Image: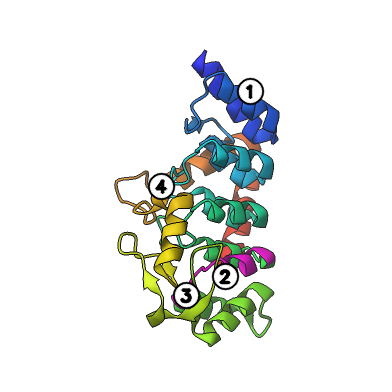
Amino acid sequence: MAEKANEALLNAAINGSVEGAEAALKAGADIDFKHTIEDFSGTALYIASIAGHVGVVRLLLRKGASMVERTGSFAPLHAAALKGWTEVVDLLVQHGATVDVRDGFQCTPLMYACGYKHVDTVRRLIELGARTDNLDGFVADRLGKAAGNIDEGTKLVQEARKTKLLRCCNPKCGKPGYRKTLKLCGRCKLTRYCSRDCQKQHWSVGHKKCCGHDAYSDEQEDPFEHWVSLMEGFAQKHGSELCLKHIQQSLKAIYG
């Protein structure tokens, strides 16, 4: 029974069916069950996040889905940022997701949004408190390969860096301030707040569940091995030539 409910939840996440997700959960589906099939792997929240199904994401968050369960080294926020689903990004952060969560390559959601040229997502991540002051190598690499033709996302990052201001990571606030004036979370050391009240509010809406799970651990699945596994499945289904083209496009999007 539970197996069928889990499968129904997976299908609902893939297809964006809020009603289907509700029915699956009522039937006993494990909200954080990790699905592993050829084209889709991860929890229902991860799958809905990478697919951009806002309604399903909202339902799963309301029902208590974990935002720290990863697929490879990717958290749901990485997936949504990479795809440019700005509304999903906003929902995840509003529910306590750490805006600067790191993957196995120490990349943040902002890096992926910028790398894939999702300008609106870059803008919103900066508004939500994503750090731009720690992207020296990333920005320099993109500028060096841009040959004077800088994309809008990189421009936004540059402009934010010039102000030398960061933002309070409580999404209900977002007040700008200099790094030395913002209080760093003593546990994860990735979120900053303009006041103790903002830290308490952010903790209560969901950061409590994410704090301490923001940096990728070596004990988790190796991201390169996961990527290789995905590419093997893609090649088996679509052929090696199309797989190579897919890899080239992905690398170009990230590194220019």
Asked if disc 3 and disc 4 are in contact, CB closer than 8 Å, the reply is: no
Residue 23 - label: 1
Residue ID for mark 3: 135
CA–CA distance in space, label 2 to label 3 = 13 Å
Q: Position of residue 244 (x, y in %)?
A: 60, 51
Residue lying farthest to the top in this orientation: 1
Q: Amino acid at mark 3?
A: Leu
Q: Which is more N-terminal, label 2 or label 4?
A: 2
Q: Which is more N-terminal, label 4 or label 3?
A: 3
Q: Amino acid at mark 4?
A: Lys
Does residue 208 show up magenta in the picture? no
Q: Is residue 132 above or below residue 204?
A: below
Please tell me how crowded label 1 is: few (under 14), some (14-19), or many (20+) other residues with Cα within 10 Å.
some
Asked if disc 2 and disc 1 are in contact, CB closer than 8 Å, the reply is: no
Q: Is residue 78 above or below residue 36?
A: below
Which is closer to the viewer, label 1 or label 3? 1
CA–CA distance in space, label 4 to label 1 = 25 Å
Please tell me how crowded label 4 is: few (under 14), some (14-19), or many (20+) other residues with Cα within 10 Å.
some
Between residue 105 and residue 62, name the one nearer to us.
62
Q: How many marks?
A: 4
For the residue labelled by badge 3, is the local secondary structure a helix, a strand or a loop? loop
Q: Amino acid at mark 1?
A: Ala
Q: Say how the picture is coloured.
A: rainbow
Residue ID for mark 2: 126
Which segment did they paint magenta?
Answer: 120-134
Which is closer to the viewer, label 2 or label 3? 2
Q: Residue at x 45, y 44 (%)?
A: 70
